Image: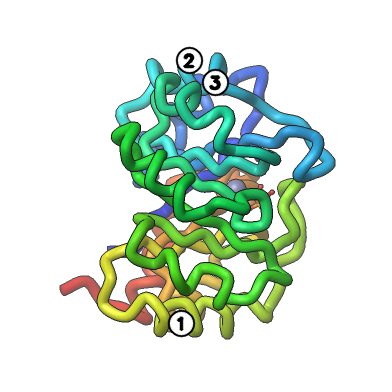
């Protein structure tokens, strides 16, 4: 089944605990946590102390998306804070194979994210070393941007490269209900959405519609 991961970047940070409870009750499968360092991307968000606080407020897995330079320096802190998956950017991790193995060693699911301009071949030789492939469908740094249509072909290509491997193929950035059927048809298994979910009055309705659109492309067995 398709997984829906609300990105808390678009939540009301002053009411973060309630916002997370709202999307958990609305049927979210996991919480997507965007960490930005003001260097890899021109924006700054949250770090381990906030993740630790979130961990106490929800039972859902916390998928932490690290948009930071030198991610290998802070892996332990994020795992300790309660991350269920740690996704690093291939553009920021020159020793990617080692970094992924370190994440796994720490008992966490390992993920790699690709910026829109990064070719699928950049991850070809680490496909056996990860649990999550995160395809950016906007340039990372901000919520509420426009979905980049070239993402569909990229998802298809990565899905082919993955072959039968069980890794999650997630799409992140500008995802709205109208993109979901086509993304899943191209091979996406997880849909990350910030504005579309947190910006809605009824988050549950958006999550249900996203799931239903995905199910049109890949009906549940
Ligand atoms: C972008 C982040 C995304 C994004 C999702 O830098 O990684 O998670 O904020 O939010 P929307 O759906 O608003 O693009
Ligand atoms: Zn993200």
**Is the residue 122 above or below the residue 131 in the image?**
below
**Mark 3 lies on residue:** 48
Q: Residue at x 55, y 37 (%)?
A: 72
Q: Residues within 10 Å of mark 1 (few under 14, many from 20)?
A: many
For disc 2, the marked residue is: 53
Q: Which residue is mark 1?
A: 186
Circle 2 — which element?
Answer: helix
Q: Secondary structure at mark 3?
A: helix
Residue at image coords 60%, 57% = 90
Q: Is residue 73 above or below residue 195?
A: above
Which element is circle 1 on?
loop
Mark 2 or 3: in front is 3
C-alpha span from label 3 to label 1: 34 Å
Tell me which numbered mark, 3 or 1, is placed earlier along the sequence: 3
Residue 46 horizontal/vertical position (percent) = 65, 25
Q: Earlier in the sequence, mark 2 or mark 3?
A: 3
Residue found 33% across the figure and 73% down from its top: 215
In which image quadrant can residue 119 be found? bottom right
Circle 3 residues within 10 Å: few <14, some 14–19, many ≥20 = some
């Amino acid at each position: 089944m398709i997984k829906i991961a609300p990105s808390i970047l678009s939540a009301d940070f002053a009411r973060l605990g309630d916002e997370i409870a709202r999307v958990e009750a609305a049927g979210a499968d996991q919480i997507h946590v965007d960490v930005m360092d003001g260097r890899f991307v021109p924006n700054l968000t949250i770090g381990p102390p906030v993740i630790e606080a979130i961990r106490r407020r929800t039972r859902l897995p916390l998928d932490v998306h690290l948009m930071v330079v030198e991610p290998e320096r802070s892996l332990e802190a994020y795992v300790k804070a309660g991350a269920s998956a740690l996704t690093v950017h291939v553009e920021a991790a020159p020793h990617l194979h080692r970094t992924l193995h370190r994440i796994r060693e720490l008992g966490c699911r390992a993920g790699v994210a690709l910026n829109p301009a990064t070719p699928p071949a950049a991850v070809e030789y680490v496909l056996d070393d990860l649990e999550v492939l995160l395809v950016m469908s906007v340039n990372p740094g901000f919520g509420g941007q426009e979905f980049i249509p070239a993402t569909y072909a990229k998802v298809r290509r990565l899905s082919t490269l993955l072959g039968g491997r069980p890794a999650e193929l997630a799409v992140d950035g500008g995802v709205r209900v109208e993109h979901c059927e086509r993304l899943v048809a191209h091979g996406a298994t997880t849909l990350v959405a910030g504005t579309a979910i947190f910006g809605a009055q009824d988050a549950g309705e958006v999550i249900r519609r996203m799931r239903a659109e995905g199910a049109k492309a890949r009906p549940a067995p």
